[in-house]
């Protein structure tokens, strides 16, 4: 992964860090957000927060994040975090061209981790991941309709999540309960993986 990437000049000029993925590289679960937050840009860790982010607290409820670790570099178990883009612009979301420029990094992470479940966070991640890994039209994938609902994909199952930072407590609870049921089931698909 290129720490000195200059593919997107407007993002490169405003970033502090290139924010590549972070977490358990043998994870069954891969969380994909749209772009790094201000704290993630400062620390270089996706979804990082000065305090534990809403996402970290949700993952902790599932036993996937250790809330006794440093919030800037949380200990994650069986989960890997990443974004569609590696850099943050402070005043706007990434453009389609900027997301396209980062696509090889995301593809490499997905191939490296080889997760069982992809967790797109928010509408933009859902649309792009849904288009790439399901046979459904991106127009049919509305985050408000499929939040916390498993979607069979090509090689991966998707479990979309509303953005935890803006979601209601009920929406966060709904996702945690749905995901706990998935974790308790036989969610592993046959993809040539060796059992751990």
Image: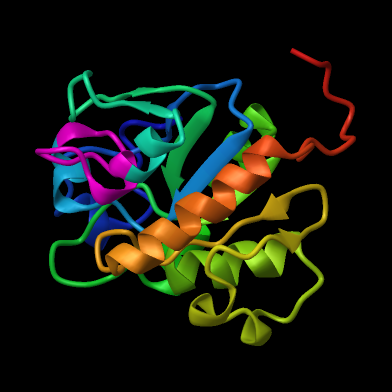
Q: Look at the image and give the residue range highlighted in magenta.
A: 43-57
Colour style of the rendered protein structure: rainbow
Tell me what residue is drawn at x 19 percent, y 38 percent.
52
From the viewer's perspective, is 112 left or right of 20? Answer: right
Q: Quadrant of the C terminus?
A: top right
At horizontal 53% and vertical 69% (from top left) the residue drawn is 147
Q: As displayed, is residue 69 above or below residue 189?
A: above
Q: Can residue 105 be seen in this view?
A: no
Given the current orientation, which residue lies at the most extreme top position? 196
Residue at 77% x, 76% y: name it. Answer: 136
Quadrant in the picture for residue 71: top left
Q: Position of residue 151 (x, y in %)?
A: 72, 63
Give left or right: position of 161 versus 15. right
Give the quarter of the image for residue 194: top right
Residue 48 spot, x, y in % from top left: 23, 39
Left or right of 122: which side holds 181? right
In the picture, residue 76 is in which quadrant? top left
Q: Is residue 193 magenta?
A: no
* Residue 93 visible in the displayed image: yes
**Magenta stretch secondary structure, dominant:** loop
Residue in view at x 55 percent, y 67 percent: 126
Q: Is residue 158 left or right of residue 52?
A: right
- From this viewpoint, which residue is outermost toward the bottom? 139
């Amino acid at each position: 992964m290129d720490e000195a990437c200059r593919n997107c000049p407007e993002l490169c000029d405003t970033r502090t860090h290139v924010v590549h993925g972070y977490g358990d590289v043998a994870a069954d679960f891969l969380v994909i957000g749209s772009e790094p937050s201000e704290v993630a840009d400062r620390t270089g860790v996706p979804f990082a927060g000065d305090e534990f982010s809403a996402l970290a607290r949700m993952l902790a409820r599932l036993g996937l994040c250790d809330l006794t670790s440093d919030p800037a570099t949380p200990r994650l178990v069986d989960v890997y975090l990443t974004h569609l883009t590696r850099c943050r612009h402070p005043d706007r979301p990434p453009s389609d061209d900027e997301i396209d420029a980062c696509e090889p990094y995301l593809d490499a992470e997905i191939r490296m981790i080889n997760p069982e479940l992809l967790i797109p966070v928010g509408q933009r991640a859902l649309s792009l991941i849904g288009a790439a890994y399901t046979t459904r039209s991106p127009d049919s994938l509305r985050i408000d309709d499929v939040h916390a609902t498993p979607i069979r994909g090509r090689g991966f199952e998707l479990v979309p999540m509303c953005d935890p930072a803006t979601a209601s407590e009920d929406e966060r609870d709904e996702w945690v309960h749905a995901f706990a049921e998935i974790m308790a089931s036989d969610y592993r698909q046959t993809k040539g993986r060796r059992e751990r």
